[in-house]
Image (tube, rainbow, N blue to C red):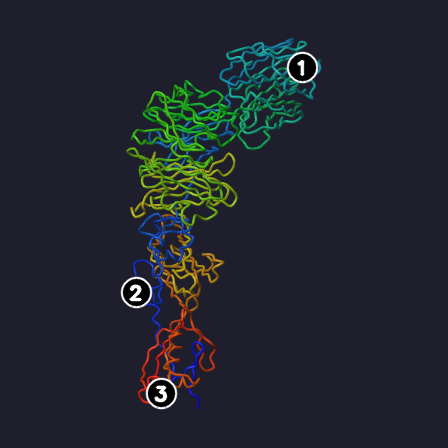
Amino acid sequence: MAPPILELNGVPLVLTPFNKDGTLIRRVDNPDTVNRFSQGQQTLADIEGFLPLRWPNLSLGLGRFRIDSDSAHIPDEMRRFFDSTLDNRWPDTCAYLPILEEDSTHSGLEEIRAAASFKGNMWSLWMDNNSRTILARKYVGSTTSFDAGGVVYQGMTQIGVESTGAATTASSITVAMPTVGAKRAIVVVVMAAHGSGSDASNIPTGVTYDGNAMTKAGDIGSPGTYAGAVSIWTLAGADVTVGTNNIVATFGSTRDEIFLAGVGVQGADLAAPFSTPAEATGVSTTPSVGITTVVGDFVVDGVLVDDGTAGAVTATVGSGQSSHMNLAATKIVRALSSRFVNASGTTTTMSWSLSGSRPWATESVSIHGYTSIPLDLLGVRTHLIALIATDDGIHVIRSTDGVTWTVSTTDELGSSILANTVTAHEVIDAGLLAEIGGEAVAAVWDEDNLNIIFYTSTDAGDNWAKEGTIAISSGNGPQGLQVFHGIDNEDKLVLMTEEALWEIDTAPSTWTSRIIRSMIGHTDNGRRMKVHSDGALWFAQGVDDDTPPSVYRMFTENGKREFEPVSNDFSAGDGMPADRMGPIRWMWSIPGQLWACAGGGKAGRNASLWCHTGKGWFSMRKHGTANQVIHILFGTADDDGTPRMHYAVRTSVGTSDANFLGQAFVNPRSGVSIKREASGYTDLPYVDGGFPLDTKTWMRFGINAEDLSGSNSGEYINVDQGITSDLGSLTARNGTDVGDFLSGTNRIALGTNGVGIAGLVIGARVNLHRASTNTNTPIWKDLQIDATVNLPKTDRYEFLVDLQESADLKGRRTTEVLTDLNTARTSDVKVPIVYADLATGYVKVLDVSYSERFESEGTQGSDENVQRRGTARVVVSEVL
């Protein structure tokens, strides 16, 4: 029988049995792992099969898409998430359900732009009438509504209405009409009839106001027997002399009946004050005319009705119109009405109802007013101060109670300093307010000269003075304005512009300014930055809609100024989900919490509310509709003592949806009742447990939770998972349902019959749900994922080599066999091994030890004839 031969590194070797049972090769344990554990997540050397991954809380916030293998042993990495709509702020839990979004009632109001706390109430500035009216509204906590308050500024205000009638054989008519205010415009309606005359003769040859000629806008004759006509005349600007002055209408011949009425407004757009007139005629009980308008227009119409018999027909004004003249005479009924346009349509219908069907004619024209934009609101001692932009100027209006508002004595800050007239619902950084050292400060944009200039008031906003020659060059207006101590520990104004952060020293009689941090130019830099309770000024670098914002803190103390990114910022780590990217538009500081609204500025981007606790950013609200921004943020417990975070979503151009989160700043462990949404989720980072290339058997999920119901009709937690085998394509975290965690269920096994699921990487989404009671929530405390690591299997073998027989195979000396074994042992690479009919394998020779004796051949005493006989024990191992 041929001896058993094994070939190692190309050298044939004869094996000899270990024992009597003839074992030639035996397998021994390969101690590649040890059962040793270190602090935190296990490393490769720590693991013997079992791999638990634990999330004890998520108190470090947003910013982890994946925990890389090198960071798998760092405990803090397991305290962050990638995306969430849950409330993850509190260190004793992973999450509660998100706080319920509640609506604040604001009937008839279009868009909120500013808010301030004043005398124990939250006050706000709203636009209405397509930016033709600015209103102040107080928030009433008991009804959760913006209610009470008054008109801060109305682009157009009616300033005069007069009418009269004349008897027969008159060729002119004179009516006195008062006018006041700025940017005045008047409309005069003249009606006349003469049984034997033509329609043309019933139209005045001219109309004047205080001797200034008016322009005929339009005229139309009645289809009736008495040949009456109605005409409309207009005048605007300086020719509308302030005071009570006469309107005179003159005809080419005497008329049987003449009637005249005038209506005036202040706040008209003098560049284009009047619309194209509209007219209509008919025979019916419903005279009407449709005129093209925009919201905020002031529409005037006049109706002439061919009566036939005095008092036989009466006219009733249409809904929404104010009647200024409604009289019957011998031959005609004449009527005049007006209305402000509040609807969003492009056509306004002016209508009347007649008591009987008669011939009629009607003419209409509208006056265009200036738009006004609220800029900022500030409570200073005895007054609320409103800063607004109207026409091309910036104005100050103030109030002691929020109801009655008065233009400040100074009124306009920097006459006509905007490059053009503001447009309806325009978003413009034209001015901000602050208070320093008891003085009110207005930082306003001189757009004509591309400078930001300053005005101050020592009497709560009534009289304003420009601050010397200080002017900060900027391509945009003020984007943030705060009071913050300088390096000398004295308060300074801190201004954020498109280009830089500036410090303004208001102590000298002549103010000074300097740049304290240059910024990458952006119109969202430092927007509504805030001084926070940590003693720092927080501000954001402006970004586009496809980039996470970067937020910084500035500390200033005792001659030293430091800037640093906030901890675990949006732009740190792995960033944030694409649908939540975009610039910060407003910040608000609550003790221990800095809130910000961001994103939502384009398709595929959802606006979000975020809160930073000092450790990281947390989601407080993800708006459900993309391409709608949250454009104001205001936290308060005013009025009823209930803490609320107020915010408004710009749902379209010119409309705000005002909402709030109740008890938003309170730790739920306090026991305060907090309303919650019905569901929410957290996406955890993808993890590989420190072994990116080694297959794991993912065995089960474990949830530690409170307040779970016994079924998924109540409060429960659902988990989804995505297990990836191809590292080039991660499986969605919510790809496969794991199951529902209910009361008494704290672990759910994966795979059929709990055999587990093989893969390299796992991602998870944790979903919280409640039943109908909105103050209930499951409390998710901990998550654990259990797995085993399937390390590549390696074997270790040993065998005995008969040195003499191996040498005899090739007629060699045994020393040559020993040399070959040592060569294999010291090889830097694996060496081939072949045995019997097995394919060639490759091993590392770990050890060669000898059991040998020395025997002499031939002449005794001759060293060259001494042979080494016996066996060599060879240990080989497969390696990873």
Residue nearer the viewer, 743 or 782:
782
Q: Secondary structure at mark 3?
A: loop
User: Which of disc 1 and disc 3 is earlier in sequence?
Assistant: 3
Residue at numbered disc 1? 202
Q: Is residue 803 visible?
A: yes
Question: In the picture provided, is 500 more to the left or to the right than 706?
Answer: right
Q: CA distance from mark 3 to mark 1?
A: 137 Å
User: Which of disc 2 and disc 3 is earlier in sequence?
Assistant: 3
The location of residue 727, given as percent across then percent down, is 47, 60
Quadrant where the N terminus lies? bottom left
Amino acid found under the numbered disc labelled 1: Asn
Amino acid found under the numbered disc labelled 3: Asp
Q: Is residue 412 above or below residue 377?
A: above
Q: CA distance from mark 2 to mark 1?
A: 109 Å
Residue at numbered disc 3? 21
Q: Is residue 265 above or below residue 346?
A: above
